[in-house]
Amino acid sequence: MDKCFLSLLVYEMSYLQDENGIALIPGFDKALSGGKTDDAGRILRLELDMDRDTAIQASEEFAPFAMSLMEIGDWCSNSGAAFGAKPDEEFMSEAKSMDVWAKYIAGFEEFDVSRAGVRDYCRMHSITGRYPELLALMAYRFCKCSSDDSEEIAMMCAANDLARAYVINRFARKAERIDMLMDERITQSYFPERADLSVEDFKRIASYLAEDLGTNIMTRKGSLFFQMTRSDEDIEALYNELIKMDV
């Protein structure tokens, strides 16, 4: 996993936005909760203040940040030290790795990993932004995956979730969950539920499902929604029907 790949994870999110800065991404409450929340079918609706220039800048800053987290984890794995221990500075090749360790890793395990607990950690460690607790959780998880010598697919997933948290924390003026395609709706989430879905939201969901059928259609309801929304007329008809049913 190199800097170019890590940069692209952030930059490519700028292409997910429509003309209003709205993007849909898969939910990642399962990652945020350490596997305790089954979020299959959940979608996150983001309203982003991100253009191509700011996306380039963010991607260039994200890559060394993620590389620092990765080499901190590598140091723990190679040295046999307990995860969270202060790394040997001579091992660090990234310029800011020791600063990243002090800000995102040092003492994290001593905190209650609830949203309130992580907020306390963020306040004490000056982790700021629009959703700092998301970034703190995913930074810790990515570093821990590296420390555990996780398989490549697990590292890729952790890197992708870290990039999403980074973008949300930096650019999201609003982040809401859409649960209508979950076969079993649950309320546990780091995000509020979007109260009123519009017909435009339905069109975005239809497009989102069509983009990557293997990844985005994860539930029976998702498959049914996709089959029933192959045209604007279909979408509007389904929207009107579901709104009448108060679904």
Image (spheres, rainbow, N blue to C red):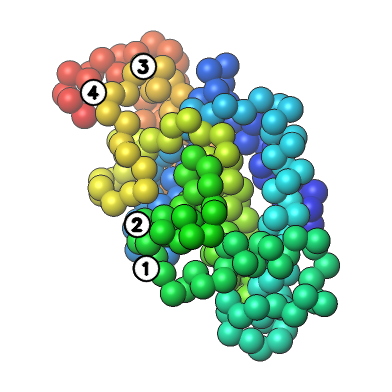
How far apart, in angstroms, are the residues tagged by discs 1 and 2? Answer: 8 Å
**179 to 188, vertically: above or below:** above
Q: Amino acid at mark 1?
A: Asp
Q: Residue at x 56, y 34 (%)?
A: 171
* Residue receiving disc 4: 242
- Which of the pair 93/195 is nearer the observer? 93
Label 2 or label 3, whichever lies nearer to me, is: 2
**59 to 136, vertically: above or below:** above
Find out whether the residues at labels 1 and 2 contact each other: C-beta distance under 8 Å: yes
* Residue receiving disc 3: 199
* Residue receiving disc 1: 112
Q: Amino acid at mark 4?
A: Leu
Q: Earlier in the sequence, mark 3 or mark 1?
A: 1
Q: Earlier in the sequence, mark 4 or mark 1?
A: 1
Q: Which element carries disc 4, helix, strand or loop? A: helix
- Pick out the residue farthest to the left: 245
How far apart, in angstroms, are the residues tagged by discs 4 and 1? Answer: 40 Å
Snapshot quadrant of residue 206: top left
Q: Earlier in the sequence, mark 2 or mark 4?
A: 2
How far apart, in angstroms, are the residues tagged by discs 2 and 3? Answer: 35 Å
Measured as percent of width and height from the top left, residue 170 is found at: 57, 39
